[in-house]
Structure formats: structure tokens, C-alpha cells
Image (spheres, grey):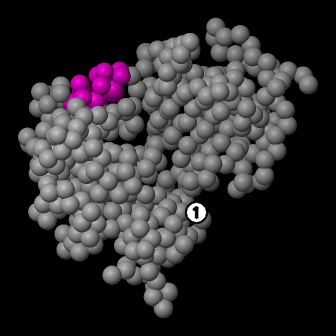
Amino acid sequence: MTDIPIAPPDEQPPVSLAAAARPYDPPETPASLEAPESPESPDAPDEALEPARTGGSAAQDFDPPKCYPVRDKLLSVLDLLHRFTDKKWERNGMSRLADLHLKVGEPARFRLDGDLIPMDKAAPLTKEVAKQLLYPLLRSDQIEKLEREYPQDVDAAFHIEEEGGMNFRINAFHDRDGVACVIRSLPRTVPSMETLGFPDEEVLHSILHLSQGLVVITGITGSGKSTTISSLLSELNRTENLRIITLEDPIEFVMKNEKCLVSQREVGLHTPTFHGGLRSALREDPDVILVGEIRDTETATLALTAAETGHLVFTTLHTRDTKGVVTRIVDLFPAERSKEVMSQLSFSLAYVIAQKLVPRSDGKGRVATYEVLKNVPAVGNLIRTGNWHQIYATIQLSARDHMISMEKHLTQLVARGVISRETAVQYANDPSQIVFGANGQPAPAA
């Protein structure tokens, strides 16, 4: 087979793609995704964009090589990223494509409505092509981490300045086949609170009027936690005169100063650690602090202290429900400090919101489902005394305080025809709490 000629980037030798061009014919769409439009198409991306890389070097022309064979074309990473802006895959202004996966020996794949789908007639990636697709998105120090004898994983952000803007979060790593990465597309604009699909918007307005306290958004990876927090911060930025400091790894949504004064700091670039940046933030007169994730005891201690001392603190955790946030935070500390932490958490915690993205019944996209825990006196007492197993029952009985269980929100979506009954049972934390009456309408179990 004849080698396919490549237009290499500056200071890089030509790369042979004979192996990459061997035939690959996955099933038809939706089992596979079609290739992006041809560069000659009027809808094709501009090949000379100037991205503003978060924390990157000075601006320079962004002209990645066209090196990836898809059908009868050679595509660049920019061509692949523009797939996220194709209106064919949008619903309510949001792309149904969430992630781009690159792995040596496999074709590029996109996550569509939760399913990982290979591109139609795309060649398996070689080691050289994988690097030519990934490395233009990274800074030189991040590339150096991947090229070490003992490589390190790299978290990075990438932002392209064009009409509407394009934001991406990147995790690059090595597996047994070579370099690999997952590139997550973030919404081109932060969605408004009204479009989040929240079951009770009174909760969101209540959070926005907090003067202090800890607000935790929890859920599995890819459940939309960052989008929810960014929507809340965007609303504060638009309506209040506050000082907002964010600590993120990496920066995902770029916030411009409106009524608020905003400082966004990237862990590893502007501050070495979350707890180091949080300690500094407490001396910088903040009103609102975003801690991207609580990962260790020191960060948890500082976040609780900040929430107690007159600051509104937002953060995320990875748990399946609201009760799991309490256990996760307490478990970060040694056993001898448990009572102290439970007491501190019972006073500093304001809200916990757990969320999931579940498939719609029409097969066109996903919808967010929520569980809301508000720290009313009864909940604070359960946290302080360690009776966490009673938290779920308290949520079920506290609708007047605008709390809602995941199961109740799922049944509401079934009643509205947004999701199927099978989906509700599949995504429930406790399927036994979902029952259906004789008329087919769902109702929570007693």
C-alpha cells in the first residue's frame, strides 16, 4: 500500500501513515458517526484560528497538521473538534456529543448520548498520528510530562476563540498501546439556570442568596456537575457585586468580569495544589470561592472553615447520592476526628445536589435528574449524631423545604413522558422506591 503524504508541522519529520490507512468499515450511523464536512465545504472550520490556551504560551497561529485518514480525506484535530459544533447533533442548543476518545490501534470515537460510537470509515490511530492530533492542544511542559521515561497523566484545558467560542477539557495518558486521551467538550456558552431542568427553581434562587455556607454538587464523571456550578456562578456574576475566586483543575468555563470581580486559577499552573490555593484565597477578601474538587483532608478542612467564616463555597465530589457526600467528607479524616468533623459539617453545609444524566425516551439526547438535600435543623442533627441512614427518609418527608429524592424526580419525568419507566428503574439509587400504579402512572413507594 502506498504511503499517504502528510503536510507535517514545523520542526517535525514526515510521518508514514501506511498502517493507519488500512480499511476500517464500522456499522452505519448511529452505530458509527459520519466524518466532519470536507474542508472545501462552506460550513467547514477555518484552518487558521488563534486559540486562547488557558495558561498557555503567547498566542500563535493554530494550524494543526491534517494527518488522520477518514474516508477519503485527511483531517486535523481541529476538524474533529468542530464535530462538536455540528447542529446535526444538537438538542435545545446543547451538543449531544460529549467526549472524543483517541487510542492507538482504534478509530476515533465520540460519546453520543452516553454511548461510545466510532467515526464512520475512520482509520485506526497509529502512535505517530495520535501524537499529531493531541500535542497541538498541549503546552510544551505538558508534552514533556507525557514524553518522560515514566510518563505522567496530564489534565489540560483548551479554548478556541471564534464565534460562540469552543471550550475543551483534556486528560492525556499512556496505556500499553501508546498515548491516549479523552477530550471533553464543554458548552459553548454557560446555560442559564432555567435550562438546567431543575425540579424546583426555588432551590437555585435560595443558593444564590446565601451569604455563607458549603454547597456541594455531586455525581459521577460526566453528570454535568461543572455545568451546574458554572451556571450558578454566571448568574451571580451577572447580578451581584462580589469577589469570586475559583480554583480549578483545569479551568473549564472562562468567566469574564461583569458585576463581579473574578479571578480564575488553575491548579498546577497558578497554584501548586487546591489546599494551597484555598489558603491563599482566604487572604484575598473573597465572597465566593469555587474549589474544583475536594480531594484530601487539608482541602476539606479549609473548605469547611471558609464556609463557617462568612464565605460561600462551591465544590464537587464523586458520589451517587446526597448522603454519600456526608460519608465521603467524614471518611477523609482519621477516626479520632470524626465527631469534630461531623459537628463542623452540620453547621457549615448548606446544600447538596446530586445529579445524573439519563437517556430521553425519544432517543434524542439526555435529561438531567436531581436529588436535593438542604441542611435544615433535622438534617444537621442527623449529620452531627452520625445517623446518616435516616437522611434519605428525611428528604422524602421534606418537600416543604424544597428537598426531593432522585427517585421522586425520576417518577416525575416518567409521568411527563420525558423518560421511560425502564430508564427510571435503571437509574434509581434505590429501585424499590419506585412503583407504578394500575393506571401506569409512577408513584413513590411508601
In this image, 96 relative to 122: left or right?
left
Query: Is residue 106 in the magenta section?
Result: no
Of residue 177 and residue 265, the one placed in the foreground of this image is: 177
Q: Residues within 10 Å of mark 1 (few under 14, many from 20)?
A: some
Picture residue at 22% right of the left edge, 55% below the top: 351
Question: Which x, y percent locates residue 201?
Answer: 27, 64
Where the C terminus falls, by quadrant?
A: bottom left
Question: Which x, y percent locates residue 371?
Answer: 33, 63
Instruction: Report the magenta residues as a range.
Output: 260-278
Question: Which x, y percent locates residue 116?
Answer: 63, 48
Q: Is residue 116 above or below residue 104?
A: below
Question: Which x, y percent locates residue 392?
Answer: 28, 66
Q: Amino acid at mark 1?
A: Lys
Residue 380 falls in which quadrant of the image? bottom left
Residue at image mark 1: 364
Picture residue at 32% right of the left edge, 53% below the top: 324
Could one spot residue 121 in this view of the protein? yes
